[in-house]
Amino acid sequence: MKLHRITALIVRHLYLYRRSLPRIMEIFYWPFLDLVIWGFITLYLARYQSQVPGFVTFFLGALILWDMLFRSQQGITISFLEELWARNLMNLFASPLKPSEFLTATMAMSVMKVTIVSIVMAGCALLFYSYNILTIGVWLMPFVLNLVIAGWIIGVFTTSLIMRFGQEAEVLAWSMVFLFQPISCVFYPMEVLPTWLQMIAMVNPAAHVFEGMRTVLGAGAPPVGDLAWAVCLNGALLVGVVAWFHRTVAYCKDQGLLVRVGE
Amino acid sequence: MSSSVLKASDLTKRFGDFTAVNGVSFEIRPGEILGLLGPNGAGKTTTIQMLLGLVTPTAGSIHMFDLDLSTHREEILQQVNFSSTYISMPQSLTVEENLWVVARLYGISDMARRVNDIVKKLEMEEFRGKVTRKLSSGQMTRLTLAKAFLTEPRILFLDEPTASLDPDIADKIRSLLKEERRSSGLSILYTSHNMREMEEMSDRIIFLQRGRIVAEGTAQDIVDRFGKADLEEVFLKFAREQGQSSS
Ligand SMILES: Nc1ncnc2c1ncn2[C@@H]1O[C@H](COP(=O)(O)OP(=O)(O)OP(=O)(O)O)[C@@H](O)[C@H]1O
């Protein structure tokens, strides 16, 4: 891996964002909208707080954490789509850049996006709803790290599909993550799912993070078991999905799809 | 150490049942300009894409600088670049920003000097600060050529490099290519549908038809061998034969 090739891609995206107001707006639009809508719903439901303790904390915390996963996935997929829209993939893949360096650069972009969005969302939650995300405590950091990695997994998976099936599959960049939302148990515990869906949720690292969040906020217990599950699943799935990305690149080169992917 | 910088042996590409490139072998020597000619669909682009590692050959091998492309991709592509009328560059970046990104990507030391030199050489000063989206097609072609020259390649693949340029700039580009090969021993693989340009530029020409090499030699050799008046007539002969067999 060569650092100069990774920074070249990061600089390319920073140049892009520096000049594009719509792209900057896009980063904040959905998180902000989510926060406003869910924030008010939460405030309304909070009147019945006595029935569900820590309701506001559950909901807004979950919402902000979910958006971190979403932005992390977008950081990967949108960076790839930008190259596709710019018909720049040929320039990149005919350069010494390795697919692993390409992925590393998109992961760095994803971390930047998540950082910016998290700061803005946490600030807004504090300002509008007097909600402080830091109430989650010391477990916040491992939760966020695991969600970022879960976002990468979905992002790399989606990117491979778009590379394989072309621009027609572009809509997956925005929709794929929502396929994972019900089995991520963001706003409800895993136990409310039917048994067969629980089995699927069990292999989703994000579901364990959200379970862990409820463990901390509800019982105040350390979510060690949940985090251990999340870390192990994230590790295994990340290795698997990166291997699949490399196989997709090889398949596209064999079929001559890499240079036609924008069509 | 071989005397060629590029050696393609028995290069074949099949897409399903269709054979786009069929057992093609050729070499490029240091400082040589090799013209790749052939009608639409003859397999020129597929050949170049295999040489750039964008398409994996079904059979055959590619060596550059005595290294095998399938095992030394990174070292080879560091010393190779390409330009085509059909590629683009990120549209929201300025011309200069695009060149900076390429310079970083290839790890060029002394980036500022290189970018300035290339901007001057290709007479791009006037639009160096312009956003790429606003370039004319000729300016865009100059930008893609600039990105190819910027990395000081030892081999350059050029797919119709002068297609959208006005005659004055096209002439300057041709002079620049000849000058670069004289001064730095740059080797070039060149495709064009402009037969006069091919005759002027190429030391040797390879004619492709339906993925096979059907003629090889200097422009004059080829014209003489087929008893035609010029390269254009030879081209028309091959193009019509290919057209007839596929219709
Ligand atoms: N990915 C692909 N899948 C299937 N067929 C392909 C693919 N890429 C190229 N071909 C076919 O291979 C043949 C050679 O195409 P190629 O683009 O190499 O021709 P060319 O000589 O560059 O033509 P032109 O002068 O029109 O650019 C064509 O018949 C084309 O349809």
Image: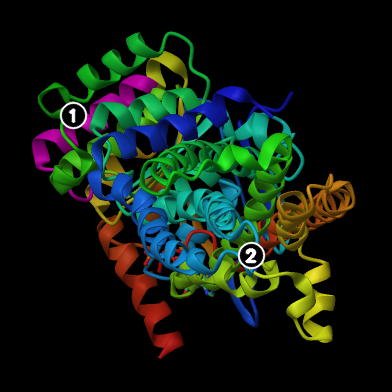
**Disc 1 and disc 2 on one polypeptide chain:** no
Q: Residue B201 location in percent, x, y?
A: 32, 37
For the point 49% across and 59% down, the residue is A259
Q: Main secondary structure of the magenta part?
A: helix
Between the residue at mark 1 and the residue at mark 2, the CA separation in whole angstroms equals 62 Å
Number of numbered markers: 2
Secondary structure state at the residue bearing disc 1? helix
The residue to which callout 1 is attached is B172
Color style of the picture = rainbow
Disc 2: residue Cβ within 8 A of ligand 1's nearest atom? no
Secondary structure state at the residue bearing disc 2? loop
Q: Judge whether residue A258 can be spotted in this image.
A: yes
- Magenta stretch encompasses residue B156: no
Q: Residue A97 location in percent, x, y?
A: 59, 37
Pointer 1 local density, CA inside 10 Å: few below 14, some 14–19, many at least 20? some
| Residue range highlighted in magenta | B163-180
Q: Residue B190 location in percent, x, y?
A: 40, 44
Lateral position of residue A210 relative to residue A15, left or right: right
The residue to which callout 2 is attached is A186
